[in-house]
Amino acid sequence: MNTNPAGRREARSSSEESISKDFDNEINKNKNGSGDESKDSDDIENNAESDFNCTEDFCEIQLDDKFWHRYRVNVPDGTDLEKCEQCTISMEVIYDGESWVSIAFSEDGGMVGSEAVITFPQIIRGIMGENGNIPQKYYLGGKGDSQIQPMPLSQQTLTDATIEVSNGQTIMKFTKVMKEDGEIEIKGGDNTFLWAYGSSNTLGYHPAKSSYNLNLFTGSSEVSDSSDRAAWLAHGIMAFMAWGVLVPFAVQSSLLRDLLPKGPLWFHLHRAFNAMSYVLTVAVFAVAVGYYNKEGEDHFDDPHQKMGLAMFILASAQVLGGLLRPHAPDPGKDKKPARFAWEIGHRATGITLLACGFWQILEGIELFAKKFEVEETSEEKVELAYLVWIGLMSVVIVVGGAFFKFRKRDSVKTSSEEAEAIEKGNIECA
């Protein structure tokens, strides 16, 4: 993340430079307090660790390849940055494209519960839209579009709020009071901001977003905790190991038991694979719940989350059923109805869970790629490798299982015919 004062930033396009200069001049006229922009030497000494003073110059943060955030803190006479009574902050957001853009103020780095300034460009380039196209303040009550609501008119206190689309860039400008009743305070020191931009002029999915910590006085900034990506990656890897590897192996160890040495080995493998997959499933579920809480997401409100919850419940029931299963009959005796019913239910639930797991993992790959902006070619390669793997697992289960089932049936039939022939021969001899 690059941070520079406006006077030192790299030149982009000549039109953007002109826009920035106009904005600087406009802000100077509207800066609270007197027109004198100089600061006391004491203020500068107190911040000697920084080369920047974001109360004198516009500081700039490049948040990604297409998105810049510029700001300056306007400190009136008679106060300082620590108290900052009636301070305002002038902001400019530049997106290298045409879309809605947003800067949000957060207390915990999560979207839900934060407050944002959002603007929507007019489809006709360079023309400011009516009511609602200019930057306005919004309350982020949830992830859904219907939960992102503009604040009441009495709280729409932004000044110098404009939106312009020029030379393929969307530029949002506004000045905001830093401390307003009933709203998240923007402090002179460290703050947590969120940023996002969309893929169209209509509010919806944002192809890029993040949170970052920013000290408004020094201009120092850093991306917020990046552990989320690692956690969701671990979530996906554990899910694949559980439902893409261990559960198929558990099914195969039962269906292909004739390939294994005689005895209980197949059962021990079947039980071990299922036990390990369930432990991973619990971990997968815990990571999802924990990080949805951390990110302020609603729980179980989309198909992937609902399927995950259903699978967790069914898997738990399957494990419990395995522990409490009716005993198998002794050799030569018929199965009791309870045992027969349990076997049918156990197999049906197992196959259902396996099919759901295959779908769930594929859906998870797509969601991860969307959430963390994975390149399309990389996503396609991972999906292809995954489809090849589950295709192989499915072939082994279906073809191998059917082969040994019919083979066993033929073996039983042959054994029965041989027994009848032997019995008939014994009768004739008698």
Image: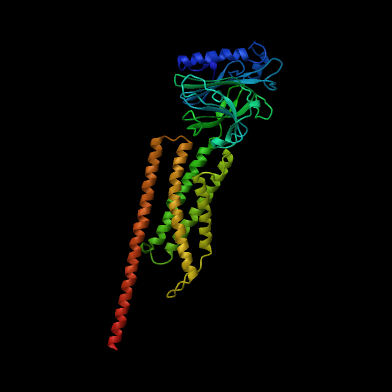
Q: Position of residue 129 (x, y in %)?
A: 52, 22
Residue at position x 44%, y 35% in the image: 374
Q: Is residue 124 visible?
A: yes
Q: Is residue 201 above or below residue 21?
A: below
Nearest the viewer among 357 and 235 is 357
Pick the quarter of the image with the C terminus.
Answer: bottom left
> Which residue in the rendered view is the most extreme toward the top?
36
Query: In this picture, is 370 found above or below 77?
Result: below
Residue at horizontal 47 percent and vertical 51 percent from the top: 242
Residue 348: x and y, percent? Answer: 45, 59
Q: Residue 107, position in %: x, y?
A: 63, 33
Q: Which residue sits furthest right?
A: 78
Q: Nearer the viewer, residue 108 or 225?
A: 108
Residue 413 occupies quadrant: bottom left
Image location of residue 58, percent across then percent down: 57, 17
Residue drawn at x 41%, y 38% as measured from the top left: 379
Let me know if residue 111 appears in the view: no
Q: Quadrant of residue 221?
A: top right
* Viewer-side residue, 182 vs 415: 182
> Relative to 358, is 148 on the left or the right?
right
